Amino acid sequence: MTATPAPTPEPAPADRSATDRPKRVLLAAPRGYCAGVDRAVIAVEKALEQYGAPVYVRHEIVHNKYVVQTLERKGAIFVDQATEVPPGNIVMFSAHGVAPTVHEEARQGRLATIDATCPLVTKVHKEAVRYAKEDFDILLIGHEGHEEVIGTSGEAPDHIQLVDGPEDVAKVEVRDPSRVVWLSQTTLSVDETMETVDALKTKFPQLISPPSDDICYATQNRQIAIKELAGQAELVIVVGSKNSSNSIRMVEVAKQAGVPAAYLVDFASEIDESWLEGVTSVGLSSGASVPDVLVQEVLEWLAQRGYLDVELVKTADETLTFSLPKELRRDLRAEAAELVKE
């Protein structure tokens, strides 16, 4: 008599390969446009609508390739310096803010101006002016060469010195350790900034903090959401441009929070399919200067590869809005024409 072979047991769920498990996307909320970026982009669109093309913009209005290209097609012209704009035209200053010398260049160039500086950046500028008038040494935490840092430093160049991370603290020297204050770029990593502040306080125990946190609410909210994603996903994708400080910080925060891999992409087409090997949970977010259409394109790209389950991971509500620059209420074309006659 022949023995009947025992049936092969089904593998336990824990033994299933990653390719057998449901694929999902963890979508961060909040993500994308912050109030300052929304205000700046709408300001360019309104200026083009009211005054017609061209409207010149000094530097990128926000750090996003898609936004800049879209506005260029509508008639915006982006320049490196206000001195490049022909007299009698309109020039807009970007959301990152500019130094007082740039306003003077525009006046001398006989240009009508629109200041689209984010109000949260303007707050830091005012703090710099205030503490400089009180003769404090100002330690500005930020990244060298970033437009926002250049603009803030220009408000009080004789009082401000840049501190580019904890490693810079050792070389900081001040006139009076009892009259020192720190300020920061608005788009930094919260954790790294506080590490720098702690190091500064160790060196200067009487260091004064700004009246309120300089890092913007949107930057903080997006970093909190990224930490939440990093705890659940095997891969994090941040949509944002390579020159966007807050987007770069989001990738760094995700890695520091323990996600195995995190990448920054401008468009869905930049995603490498090899990143998805063995991955069942993808975390997805976007920087504060990214329109949501780019996130939707990434969701479609992932859906085509089996990531059909989209779960919203919400960590905060954002309701803040800013009014448009007051200059848009004036006839700037007429003002620019009068400036040329002077």
Image (cartoon, rainbow, N blue to C red):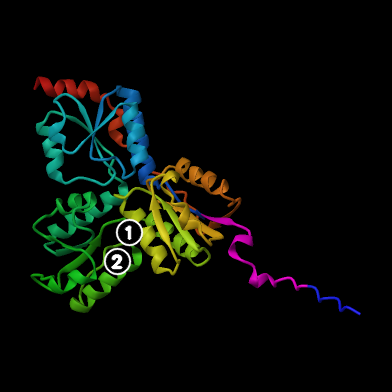
Residue 310 location in percent, x, y?
59, 52
**The one of 269 and 121 positioned closer to us in this rendering:** 269
Which label sits on residue 193? 2
For label 1, the crowd category at 10 Å Cα-Cα, with few meaning under 14, some 14 to 19 and many 20 or more, is many
The answer to the question of whether label 1 and label 2 lie on touching residues, with beta carbons closer than 8 A, is: yes
Residue 15 lies in magenta, yes or no? Answer: yes
Q: Is 342 placed left or right of 121 in the picture?
A: left
Q: Is 179 placed left or right of 278 in the picture?
A: left
Q: Quadrant of residue 79?
A: top left
**The one of 19 and 104 positioned closer to us in this rendering:** 19
Name the residue located 28 percent from the left edge and 51 percent from the top edge.
121
Name the residue located 53 percent from the left edge and 62 percent from the top edge.
278
Residue 55 lies in magenta, yes or no? Answer: no
What range is drawn magenta here? 8-27
Determine the secondary structure under disc 2.
helix
Q: Label 1: which residue? A: 215
Amino acid on which disc 2 is placed: Thr
Name the residue located 24 percent from the left edge and 46 percent from the top edge.
97
